[in-house]
Amino acid sequence: MAEIATETAQVNASLQKCLDVVTDIQRYPEWISDIKEVRILSTDSEGRPDEVTFRAAAFGRSTNYTLKYDYSELPNKLRWVQTSGDHTNKLDGSYTFDETDSTTRITYELEAELKIPIPGFIKRRAETLIINSALRDLKARAESK
């Protein structure tokens, strides 16, 4: 059964800087510590990554999954859905952006379902770690640009 986890962070950067970071998917390995490799399978009509395969390392394991991105709600939201994965059935999520003056509030939502059942408290701890790490890394990247 899939569970949804959500976290929000205030980033001291403009909405455009935050969008530049999250849509530059091929550079994810430079600032997301768990992402080891990105392979862009297709792009949309504007040249943005549309379907992307990732190799990630987490908890001492390597995993591969492919995400399909949906840019139709930009600049307010970037969505993705998993199309395949070796350890996950679902890894769907979104970034929602709310700009206020010189800062941007980013909400990260992730719906994850593993192929192998694990106890709920371990799954929730892993989801929290993934989301907190992703937002922390995104905040650091956007604020450093």
Image (tube, helix red, strand yellow):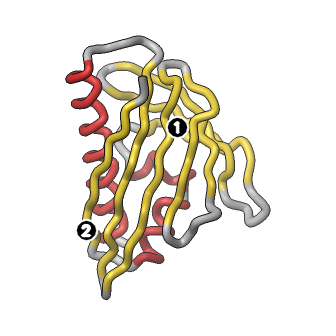
Between 122 and 20, the one nearer to me in the picture: 122
Image-based side of 85 in relation to 15, left or right: right
Residue reaching furthest front?
Answer: 1
Between 89 and 139, the one nearer to me in the picture: 89
Q: Are marks 1 and 2 in contact (CB under 8 Å)?
A: no
Residue reaching furthest bottom?
Answer: 101
Amino acid at dot 1: Glu
Q: CA distance from mark 1 to mark 2?
A: 28 Å
The total of numbered circles placed on residues is 2
Q: Residues within 10 Å of mark 1 (few under 14, many from 20)?
A: some
Q: Earlier in the sequence, mark 1 or mark 2?
A: 2
Residue 10's disc is 2
Picture coordinates of residue 79, whole percent (x, y)? 54, 53
The residue located at (45%, 32%) in the rendering is: 56
The residue located at (54%, 36%) in the rendering is: 54
Picture coordinates of residue 29, whole percent (x, y)? 45, 46
Image quadrant where residue 97 sits = bottom left
Residue 134's disc is none
Give the quadrant of the N terminus.
Answer: top left
Vertical placement of residue 92 versus 2, above or below: below
The residue located at (30%, 78%) in the rendering is: 103
Q: Regarding mark 2 in the picture, which secondary structure is present there? A: strand
Picture coordinates of residue 69, whole percent (x, y)? 61, 50
In front of the other: label 1 or label 2?
Answer: 2
Give the quadrant of the C terminus.
Answer: bottom left
The residue located at (71%, 41%) in the rendering is: 41
Residue that mark 1 sits on: 37
